[in-house]
Amino acid sequence: MNRFVIVIFIFTMLFGCTTNLQRTYPKTSRSLLWTAMVAVAESPEYQAENVLKRWIVVENNVNANASLGIIEVRRILARSLQLPLQEVQNDRRNILFTVYLLPGELPTLKFVSLGSQMIPARGVNESERYFRAVEEMLEPPLSHVR
């Protein structure tokens, strides 16, 4: 019985930890959404008020295929963090995800983080960061809003 539980745990950790989320943008053209998707993938921003969410992008590999509507992203992030009463903590993180511009009438973006990430919450955090950055690019400048 214990061996079975261990096998299930390992299988889940290796293959079951994916994040699969999507958002629809009914007031945005497909071409504008695609442009924002690529721009966000190519220029990631990891500055945040929360010190735990601040990272430096060490490497950012983006493969965008407009004819298929697929963007594959592989990033390496790093940070050096010292919290009160603790030693300096040096972290390095690999981020792997794919975003899709789904076919259909309504422009829909699908975010899938790959199963190699051991902590599913990281995929959710990355998807929220990505969606937020795309939505910021799609918002009209405040000077034009009345």
Image (spheres, grey):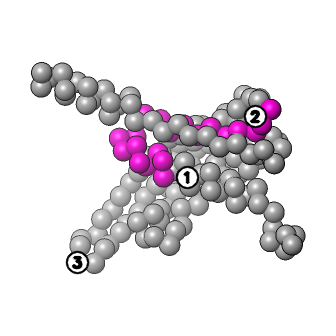
**x and y, in percent, of residue 59 in the image:** 52, 51
In magenta, the rendered stretch is 105-125
Q: Is 81 placed left or right of 7 in the picture?
A: right
Residue appearing at x 80%, y 40% in the figure: 30
Tag 3, which secondary structure? loop
Decide which of tag 2 and tag 3 comes sooner along the chain: 2
Q: Is residue 65 visible?
A: no
Tell us which disc is closer to us: 1 or 2.
1
Q: Is residue 62 visible?
A: yes
Amino acid on which the number 3 mark rests in the picture: Leu
Residue neighbourhood size for the residue with mark 2, other residues' Cα within 10 Å, grouped as few (<14), some (14–19), many (≥20): some
Residue appearing at x 43%, y 58% in the figure: 78
Quadrant in which residue 85 is drawn: bottom left
Q: Residue furthest bottom?
A: 84
Residue neighbourhood size for the residue with mark 3, other residues' Cα within 10 Å, grouped as few (<14), some (14–19), many (≥20): few
Magenta span has 64?
A: no
Amino acid on which the number 1 mark rests in the picture: Glu
Q: Dot 2 corresponds to which residue?
A: 66
**x and y, in percent, of residue 57 in the image:** 52, 57
Decide which of tag 1 and tag 2 comes sooner along the chain: 2
Q: Is residue 124 above or below residue 18?
A: below
Q: Dot 3 corresponds to which residue?
A: 85
Residue neighbourhood size for the residue with mark 1, other residues' Cα within 10 Å, grouped as few (<14), some (14–19), many (≥20): some
Alpha carbon of mark 1 to alpha carbon of mark 2: how far? 23 Å
Decide which of tag 3 and tag 1 comes sooner along the chain: 3
Alpha carbon of mark 3 to alpha carbon of mark 1: how far? 31 Å
Tag 1, which secondary structure? helix
Amino acid on which the number 2 mark rests in the picture: Ala
Quadrant that contains the N terminus: top left
Q: Dot 1 corresponds to which residue?
A: 128
50 or 67: nearer the viewer = 50
